Amino acid sequence: MPADRTTLRAFLSANEQAETEMLAALVREPSDNPPGDCARHAEVTAKLLEALGFTVERHKVPTELCRKHGMISAANLVARKTYGPGPTIALNSHGDVVPPGTGWTTDPYGAEIRDGWMYGRGSAVSKSDIATYAYAMLALEKSGLKHGTIELHVTYDEETGGEIGPQYLLEQGISKPDLALGAGFSYQVVEAHNGCLHLEVEVTGRSAHAAKPYTGIDALEAATTILSALYAWRGELAHRVSKTPGIGAPQLTVGLIEGGINTNVVPDRVTLRLDRRIVPDETPAEVEAELRAVIEGAARAHPRAGLSIRRILLATPLTPTPAAAALTQLLCQHASAELNTEVTAGGVPLYTDARHYAAAGVPIVLYGAGPRSIEEANAHRADERVRPSDLHAATRVVALALADLLEA
């Protein structure tokens, strides 16, 4: 007998307030990354899941491994529901968030509901989908589903790369899923996204008194030449538009500059950090080689200055896979019906830790609670928000799509 969709819907309808309250509890517990001291939030999440009847595995990340990846503490949570024989599907959402920053009109940890929106850091990205996936799994259990296993993965390092979250779970053999679904937004199914390259460029010179700057080697002067070359080259990227809808062109940002000793001293060291987004059409190794060549070419104008380039992060793009096509189609179908608007699959210009599932050979797409766009959600900026109605709709979509997929 197939899972009872009427029972599934009735359960979710009866628990909308409880699901909203779960999200509010997750938002109220800070989990800013940096600094990345997230073990407490993991424990709060585990207890909320246990209160719902889940058995929760806590996989503490070793302290030294956390430090290596710029964090203080983290634990990965796994909660499994086995409904019957069949494939294993992982549902991943991250509990770490970027710091709130300034400009909020409400408490960033208050989970205030105003004019139909819940406000708070992580309300949309992506604490919402911890609740989405948990309640979808419960609804499937109540519906009498007799096929497959679903795992909820709650990880805490998406904002720093995912190496001690999803990658750790997969490399350690803690989870071996056949398919995965990652956190997303309700009005699009994401089957492709950008990769990202972070480089640190260090220019070294020799300090000197400002009264006699010619006796030193000005690292900032050399760095300025490199910056000028990068900004001139950046304009060329606009002509490399991806063939994947929603991706656009590659981007380059110089996000951090540090250097100098004092106002009256010739700077002996300047450090730049670069963010280069990689579209699915590009090869990461070729992107890195080209960017290094631009930097090294500009540096030749200052042969007395030293130059070193260090890779900090290389995240590969996510590309569509045939093995995920059935899940993508079902999510689009149910989302279009539940939201009464056409929901399609495409790409987004950001990057996520979904790439770790893909790299391990696990097909993955992204879908979850959220408004129409990152901008509407105020993601990574002040007054981040999500509609509880979108949270509830996304939960129905996920539950219905997984029921159809597992029964097929």
Image (cartoon, rainbow, N blue to C red):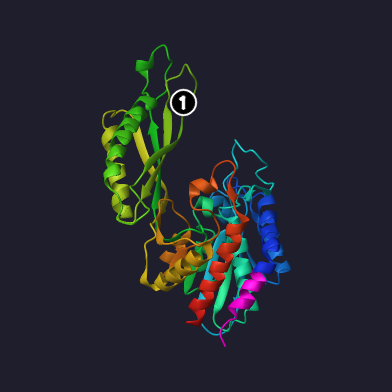
Residue 109 colored magenta? no
Task: Look at 34% across and 16% down and name the residue there.
Answer: 214
- Location of residue 43 in the rendering, given as x and y in whole percent from the top left corner: 69, 60
Task: Look at 43% across and 15% down and name the residue there.
Answer: 209
Q: Nearer the viewer, residue 248 or 31?
A: 248
Task: Look at 46% across and 59% down and name the residue there.
Answer: 188
- Location of residue 168 in the rendering, given as x and y in whole percent from the top left corner: 52, 63
Residue 320 occupies which quadrant of the picture?
bottom left
Magenta residues, start to end: 1-12
Evaluate whether residue 148 shows in this view: yes
The kind of residue tagged 1 is Gly
Residue 316 occupies which quadrant of the picture?
bottom left
- Location of residue 294 in the rendering, given as x and y in whole percent from the top left corner: 28, 39
On the picture, is 275 further left or further right than 157? Answer: left
Task: Look at 54% across and 45% down and name the residue there.
Answer: 378
Residue 292 occupies which quadrant of the picture?
top left
Residue 2 colored magenta? yes
Evaluate whether residue 174 shows in this view: no
In the picture shown, does residue 350 fall above or below 403?
above
Residue under numbered circle 1:
260
